[in-house]
Image (cartoon, rainbow, N blue to C red):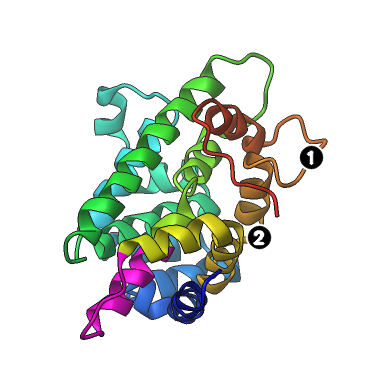
Amino acid sequence: MTDLEQQVFTQVRAIISNEEQVIGRRGILIPLKKAIIADGDIRNVIDIVSSDPALSAHLLWRSSSADHATPQSTKNRSLKDALVRLGQVNIYRYAFTFYLKERLDELEQPYKKLVQGYWTLTESIAVDAVDQLHQMDNVQINPDEVQTLALFSVFGEIIALTAFAYLNSELKEPYPLSVLKSVIEDKQQTLTIEAFESLGLDEELCGEFMVAHNLRQTHNVNSPGLILRRVLAKRNLLLRAV
């Protein structure tokens, strides 16, 4: 790495470590995480989610998209039914991506356009991964675990680009995007793993992400990471091992 690339790498890592700066709105996520960690009554989780109608609507939609439910069944499903079906870990993952997307939409150009391109890619990967799962027989894999995992397929790139956008917004002479591109190409795995750790995502998600990118092997035939690996390999999106 050049001195300039090392400087950008160090500064981007510092921003990634600031959970609130990266994800932004914490009003729902913090109490939601506490309720899930406490492993208490699902009604507490329902109350927290229902306090944000936009999040509630999003989770109702997500609750049907992974299991290929019909529009009619979605219409008749209550928020409680949807959240019970999703499970608390998937509820948090979906909520995290929902608020992350909100944060990304607030970025200035050209970063907003670039990061939205990544987001469109993750949604496309998620559809492919769930379709892959539904074409398989004799597997015991939760489709929401496949979908939530797929939504983090290029998580490192999204978070690094977001951090870079915040970094440049504070500078009189912004760094060129080409510098970040070189940093991501060289330190993609490091940035991704640190993003998972700094933003408080569950260890299982990080572990399956490593399986999906062929950076960790598993003997679990029902690993959602193995489903996603096929999609990422086909798209030539597997992280380089370092």
Horizontal relation, residue 168 to residue 152: left or right: left
Q: Quadrant of residue 108?
A: bottom left
| Label 1 sits on residue | 218
Q: Is residue 123 visible?
A: yes
| Secondary structure category for the residue under label 2 | helix
Q: Given the image, on which type of amino acid does mark 2 rest?
A: Glu
Instruction: Using the numbered discs, state the Cα–Cα distance from disc 2 to disc 1 in whole angstroms.
Output: 15 Å
The residue closer to the viewer here, 11 or 174, is 174
Query: Which residue is located at x 44 percent, y 76 percent?
Result: 8
| Label 2 sits on residue | 203
Residue lying furthest front:
2
Mark 2 vs 1, N-terminal side: 2
Q: Is residue 109 above or below residue 19?
A: above
Query: Which residue is located at x 39 percent, y 57 percent?
Result: 158
Query: Which residue is located at x 37 percent, y 71 percent?
Result: 163
Query: Which residue is located at x 52 percent, y 63 percent?
Result: 41
The residue closer to the viewer here, 92 or 107, is 107
In the image, residue 47 lies at what x, y percent?
35, 64
Q: Is residue 154 above or below residue 15?
A: above
In the image, residue 178 lies at what x, y percent?
36, 60
Q: Is residue 40 visible?
A: no
Say whether residue 170 is magenta.
Answer: yes
In the image, residue 2 lies at what x, y percent?
52, 72
